[in-house]
Image (cartoon, helix red, strand yellow):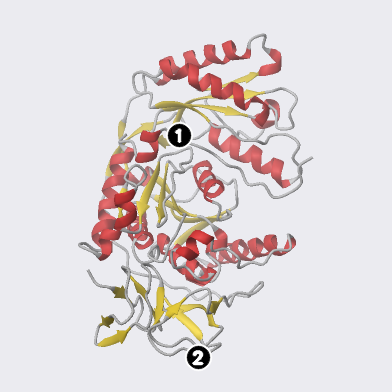
Amino acid sequence: MQSAVRIHQSDNVAVALKPLSKGEVITLGEDSFTLKEDIEQGHKFALVDIKENENIIKYGTVIGHAITPIPAGTHVHVENIKTNLGDLLEYTYQPESFPQPDARKRTFQGFIRKNGDVGIRNEIWIIPTVGCVNNIVQRVERESQSLIRGSIDGIHAFTHPYGCSQMGGDQENTRRILADLIVHPNAGGVLVLGLGCENSNIDVLKGYLSEYDEERVRFIVAQKEEDEVAACMKQIEELAELVSKDVRTECPASKLKIGLKCGGSDGLSGITANPVVGQFSDLLVADGGTTVLCEVPEMFGAETQLMNRAKDKVVFDKTVSLINNFKEYFTANHQTIYENPSPGNKAGGISTLEDKSNGCVQKSGSAAVSDVLEYGDRLVTTGLNLLSTPGNDLVAATAEAAAGCQMVLFTTGRGTPFATAVPTIKIATNTRLAEAKKNWIDLNAGRAIEDSSIEAVGEELYDLVIETANGKPCRSEQAGYHDIAIFKQGVTL
């Protein structure tokens, strides 16, 4: 295994692939460098003397500028580098395209729903319209476990604190996300429980459902029932009778819709796990499938890579709006647009938002961007899609599930147990994490720089996606983890 990597030939920094010691000589191609201080795994060090105010180059692009002189062989991090990001920008469409892999024509065993959508799980979901009934749906979930039989994969309640006392866009966000989940193909049956007096009551929520299978989606208003738990259990029993008889059928990979997400990133995210996911994304898109890249703040500083891959000027303009609208969201709330890397990100070697973003967008591969979705939108176009979400793991992954993704691929360098409403596969950036948290991690992408390659591990990931789509539970499912979170932006009454 090599000790460090210069990602692009024009880079003036390299990244340590393992802990490096002061005095160690690092050889990159025909060049050798002597370290003047210890460098942690995932962290950057200067390859040349970098002057104050000179740009730091990584991934072949600017990730910030030096705020002090940085001698060659020394650590490049938050103490001596600062972002170059500013306010709204104007962009010019400069179309780029890249060679794509041949179609593999892969298939999986899925559940074909009445409307033609395909689920990879056959679950019963219990969805509250308002946080006031969270305890009830949790009780119903507990008491329903004995009803799991036949092809039922699970019975889950998805609690949230919203549905009332919200204003404007927040109430709209709640209604759209809940409506999206009600018609999700991973749910063979859905029970929606309302209180009766909330803003987003069942009658209102039904207006957000263009069509649904009335046999498979049931509604109960707690205030209208003498015993709301008994009423819920009766509906769950009827749904279980239907759902348990569903069968898996062979489906083309073009029916797969997969969310792409990262969290707890480190300095290896853009070198191992995210490029592996990007390799997978290109393979699935070549098979006619769909992938979704979210986390708009983690596109800042790398957005032109996505804009120039837009399939046409219309999609380019939508991508520009996606970026600038989110910047306006930051400034309208009197926040700087570049304070994104978390303490964990920085500890893992990420210094600026550009540094994080250029690693983040690696998950999108190199396929053309086929469409751009607003928060709460459902997928309508196959191929690579961009989705407007914040960077928050829970909110962003939930939005991908609500958009129609049957699975989320979640890369991490620090580790996290979180899983959203759909199977959430965890992909480690490094072997240390993969071995330390085997109960969290499904795939070790650190092998891509040890005994394998990005391409080979990308193929392994495609195999894992197919296995998971066929019904193999991922680590988070084995642990029983599932959750949702809805984007809150404004005032609570």
Quadrant of image for the C terminus: top right
Q: Secondary structure at mark 1?
A: loop
Picture coordinates of residue 38, whole percent (x, y): 37, 75
Picture coordinates of residue 370, whole percent (x, y): 47, 58
Tally of marks: 2
What amino acid type should be assigned to the residue bearing mark 1?
Pro
| Residue 266 in sight here | yes
Q: Is residue 396 above or below residue 30?
A: above
- Mark 1 crowdedness (10 Å alpha carbons): few <14, some 14-19, many ≥20: many
Give the mark nearest the N terminus, 2 or 1.
2
Picture coordinates of residue 187, whole percent (x, y): 46, 30
Q: Which residue is nearer to you in this view: 233 or 293?
A: 233
Pair 2/1: label in front: 2
What amino acid type should be assigned to the residue bearing mark 2?
Lys
Mark 2 vs mark 1, CA separation in Å: 55 Å
Q: Which residue is mark 2?
A: 51
Q: Which residue is drawn at the image coordinates 39% and 39% (left, top)?
A: 476
Quadrant of image for the N terminus: bottom left
Q: Which residue is mark 1?
A: 185
Q: Secondary structure at mark 2?
A: loop
Q: Which residue is drawn at the image coordinates 43% and 88% (left, top)?
A: 71
Q: Is residue 290 above or below residue 485?
A: below
Left or right of 449 on screen, residue 420: right
| Residue 120 in sight here | no
Q: Which residue is nearer to you in this view: 301 or 91?
A: 301
- State which quadrant residue 151 falls in: top left
Q: Which residue is nearer to you in this view: 481 or 251?
A: 481
Left or right of 42 on screen, residue 126: right
Q: Which residue is drawn at the image coordinates 37% and 31% (left, top)?
A: 111
Left or right of 283 on screen, residue 260: right
Picture coordinates of residue 344, whole percent (x, y): 49, 59
